C-alpha cells in the first residue's frame, strides 16, 4: 500500500509552478531528445525532425482538449461553452492527443512528401519515456482515482479507502515500454516495429486499466479510451502482419 501524498505546485522564488505541467513539459523534452538521437542514427535531418515535433505537439494538445470536451464532459461544456478555452483548469485526454498528433503529423508528411513509417517509427521511440515522466504528474495530483483494491500498489486515500491510481500504473507502463524499445534498439528490427509494439501495449493497457477507473464517463460500459484502445490493438495486429514488407534498420 502506498500512503497518499499530493504535490500540486512548487514555488520557484516568486513563481508558482504547476507540478503536473512541469512534468509533462519535461516528459515532452526528454521524449523528443531521445527520439532525435534515433533520427540522427538513421540519417534523418534534425531540422525536419523538430519541425515535425512542433506541429505534432500543437495537434496533440488541440486533439487532447477536443476529445475530452466532446466525449468526457459534453454536458458540462454544452452548458458552459466558454469553459472550453479554460485550459488552465485541466481537462485533457491522452487518447485524443494521439489522434491530434496523428492528424497534424499526417498533414506534414503529405505536404513535405515524407516517409510515414520511417518518421513515425522515430518519433514514437521517445513517446513512452515522455508518458512515463508526464504520468508521474498525474500520480502526484491524483487526478485519476480508481476503484477500491487490496493491491500492493493501491493508494490509501484520505477517505480511508485504498484505491488503484491510474496515473501511477500508466507511468510504470510507459517506463516498461521505453525499456523494451531500448532493448529492441540493440537488435535488427524493421521500420515500424516501434509503432506496432507501442500501439499493441497502449491498446491492451488502456483497455484493461480503464476498467479500474472510478469516475470516467462510459458509453455502453466502456470509456472512450477503451474504444480507441481496441482500434490501437487492431492497428498493431495489422502492422505486425505487414512487417515483413518493411526494410531492416
Image (cartoon, rainbow, N blue to C red):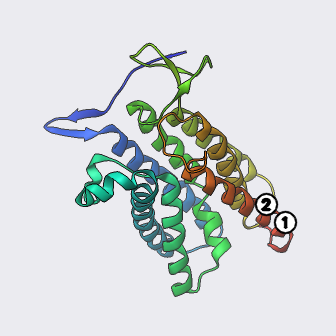
**Which residue corresponds to the image point at 53% horizontal and 60% vertical from the top-left?**
98
Determine if residue 134 is in view. Answer: yes
Q: Position of residue 161 (x, y in %)?
A: 48, 16
Furthest toward the left, the residue is 14
Q: Secondary structure at mark 1?
A: helix
- Mark 2 and mark 1 in contact? Answer it, CB < 8 Å: yes
**Which residue corresponds to the image point at 40% horizontal and 60% vertical from the top-left?**
61
- Left or right, 164 with reference to 215: right
Q: Which residue is more in the foreground, 219 or 27? A: 219
- Residue bearing the label numbered 2: 237
Q: Which quadrant of the rendered structure holds the C terminus?
A: bottom right
- Left or right, 200 with reference to 55: right
Q: Position of residue 135 (x, y in %)?
A: 48, 40
Q: Position of residue 243 (x, y in %)?
A: 82, 67
**Which residue corresponds to the image point at 68% horizontal and 55% vertical from the top-left?**
230
Residue 48 higher or lower than 146, as above or below: below
Residue 67 higher or lower than 133, as above or below: below
The quarter of the picture where residue 190 lies is bottom right
Q: Which residue is more in the foreground, 78 or 242? A: 78
Q: Which quadrant of the rendered structure holds the N terminus?
A: top right
- Residue bearing the label numbered 1: 241
Determine if residue 193 is in view. Answer: no
Q: Position of residue 52 (x, y in %)?
A: 48, 71
The quarter of the picture where residue 44 lies is bottom right
Q: Secondary structure at mark 2?
A: helix
Badge number at residue 117? none
Mark 2: few, some, or many residues within 10 Å (few <14, many ≥20)?
Answer: some
Amino acid at each position: 500500500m502506498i500512503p497518499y501524498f499530493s504535490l500540486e505546485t512548487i514555488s520557484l522564488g516568486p513563481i508558482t509552478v504547476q507540478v503536473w505541467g512541469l512534468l509533462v513539459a519535461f516528459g515532452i523534452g526528454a521524449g523528443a531528445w531521445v527520439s532525435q538521437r534515433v533520427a540522427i542514427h538513421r540519417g534523418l535531418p534534425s531540422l525536419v525532425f523538430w519541425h515535425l515535433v512542433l506541429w505534432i505537439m500543437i495537434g496533440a494538445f488541440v486533439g487532447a482538449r477536443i476529445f475530452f470536451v466532446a466525449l468526457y464532459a459534453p454536458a458540462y461544456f454544452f452548458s458552459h461553452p466558454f469553459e472550453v478555452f479554460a485550459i488552465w483548469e485541466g481537462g485533457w485526454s491522452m487518447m485524443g492527443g494521439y489522434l491530434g498528433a496523428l492528424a497534424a503529423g499526417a498533414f506534414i508528411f503529405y505536404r513535405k512528401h515524407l516517409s510515414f513509417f520511417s518518421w513515425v517509427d522515430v518519433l514514437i521511440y521517445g513517446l513512452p519515456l515522455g508518458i512515463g515522466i508526464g504520468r508521474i504528474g498525474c500520480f502526484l495530483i491524483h487526478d485519476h482515482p480508481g476503484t477500491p483494491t487490496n493491491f500492493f500498489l493501491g493508494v490509501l486515500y484520505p477517505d480511508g479507502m485504498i484505491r488503484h491510481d491510474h496515473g501511477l500504473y500508466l507511468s510504470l507502463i510507459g517506463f516498461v515500454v521505453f525499456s523494451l524499445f531500448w532493448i529492441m534498439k540493440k537488435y535488427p528490427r524493421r521500420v515500424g516495429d516501434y509503432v506496432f509494439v507501442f500501439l499493441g501495449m497502449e491498446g491492451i493497457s488502456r483497455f484493461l486499466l480503464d476498467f479500474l477507473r472510478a469516475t470516467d464517463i462510459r458509453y455502453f460500459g466502456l470509456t472512450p479510451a477503451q474504444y480507441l484502445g481496441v482500434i490501437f490493438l487492431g492497428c498493431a495486429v495489422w502492422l505486425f502482419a505487414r512487417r515483413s514488407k518493411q526494410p531492416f534498420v
